[in-house]
Image (cartoon, rainbow, N blue to C red):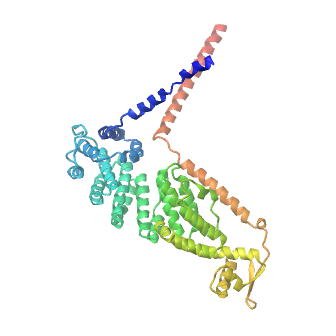
Amino acid sequence: MASSLKSKPKVETPKTDVDVEMKEESPSKSQAEVDLLTVEDIKDHVIIIEKSVINKEPRFVLRVLRQLSSTRKRLNDAVLHHLIKVYLSDSYEFKSKLSGYFVSTESLKEEKTHVKSALTEIYVHLLVLIHLLDKNRINDGIPCAQALINKVMSINKPTVHLLGARCFFYYSRAFEMAGRLHEARTLLHGRLRTSTLRHDSEGQAMLLNLLLRNYIHYNLYEQAEKLISKTTFPENANNNESARYLFYLGKIKATQLEYSEAFKNLNQAIRKAPQNAAIGFKQAATKLLVVVQLLLGEVPERHIFRDQHLRLSLQPYLMLTQAVLAGDLGKFSTVLETYSDKFMKEGTMTLINRLRHNVIKTGIKSVALSYSRISLSDVAEKLQLDSPEDAEYIIAKAIHDGVIEATIDHSNGYMQSNDSADVYSTNEPLKAYHERIRFCLDIHNHSIKAMRFPPKSYNDNLEDAQKQREREQQDLEYAKEIAEEEEDGML
């Protein structure tokens, strides 16, 4: 008892209260401190850009562009007004106009204007344009974008290619938000020709994707197909642009009834997309992939509809898949009426309307497997068709396409199903294995093409190997000299 009584006072409950109070009392950073940190980060970006200009290495700019998404979230009027005042020289034509977009504040310490390269001025101008678009200031964004593009087009240096490609993206985005996307098409075409002549692979990839997006926005699929046939997408483009190009290509091929090519391109687009980001892109590509797969007569994999990022957005497409697999025309029509606005907004309504024939074919296939003989009127009733004549026409088309193996008795008005052949006695297994092998080889080839190495690293390795051979030669000569000395000593 005595020991238990002594142990009770050792319980120290107030410590937890003290810890909580310390956490609550930790002051949050003021807006001025946050702005100061943002300016310091952008100063580091400017240093990297200047290093890229001095060393003539465009890859340094890529580090800055990778942080652009986090930087744009911290931009505000005070930060941008400070950057314009510090990093844009007085000779910059659009400086006064850019300064007029933002109200000056005294939250940041004033600095003298630093004379920097044109690449730094383009970067600051790009930050201004991004902020205007994020704030939905379209009337200010379009002249700002036009001035930025004029500045980019006046410079012909390899270090500008990466940053210039991103500038063209936001230039097109500004016109798209204003509902005037067609006005940017002429300039993009001209710049694509210039980028091709200058071997600007990043610019080529970006401009080609922007033009395809422009055509698809206005449903100009024939012009988009002509553009693809007369251009070549650069092989050394980054994965994000490759994924966008494959997505647009898949959408164009699907619209032109080339479902096999569309399925292959959409699969590659999803595979090339970032694994832990670009959720919206994955959703759009997966929706189109599901519809194309259904048009091919295949069943989408179940795990696609269970993905945590895709489950909610793919719910209408899951119901659509269930209706197609069941061959239930009534359920298909109900899904189409319920989600017609959603399908129209996502641009898949045209392809989904084509699925009606697949629903009927699936229904005919299930009827042919279930009944050895069935009247045409019963087929029309089960498939919810208007008349036995419609059923007769659809059955004849299915027999011609090889969907079912059956014969039609026109005089008695019934369908006679034939015995199903063994699939392993046909070439279907061979075709399936061929498709899988080709898919694996494509993954291997794309993985090799996606490998990146620092510029001139191959020459460095050659120099290191040459030095190593010289050292080995010197070691051999030294060893021979020691051996000769030992032999002389032995004699």
Q: Is residue 487 left or right of residue 234?
A: right
User: What is the x, y in percent for residue 232?
Assistant: 47, 59
User: What is the x, y in percent for residue 243?
Assistant: 50, 56
Q: Is residue 387 left or right of residue 309?
A: right
Q: Is residue 75 visible?
A: yes
Quadrant housing residue 400: bottom right
Above/below status of 345 relative to 102: below
Residue reaching furthest to the front: 1
Above/below status of 414 relative to 9: below
Quadrant housing residue 1: top right
User: What is the x, y in percent for residue 328?
Assistant: 64, 74
Q: Nearer the viewer, residue 77 or 149?
A: 77
Q: Is residue 129 left or right of residue 442?
A: left
Above/below status of 415 relative to 161: below
User: What is the x, y in percent for residue 389?
Assistant: 66, 88
Q: Across the whole image, how many numbered discs are drawn on residues?
A: 0
Q: Is residue 256 visible?
A: no
Q: Is residue 267 left or right of residue 418?
A: left
Residue reaching furthest to the bottom: 411
Residue sitting at x 34%, y 66%: 179
Quadrant housing residue 30: top left
The image quadrant where one finds the C terminus is top right
Q: Nearer the viewer, residue 140 or 253?
A: 140
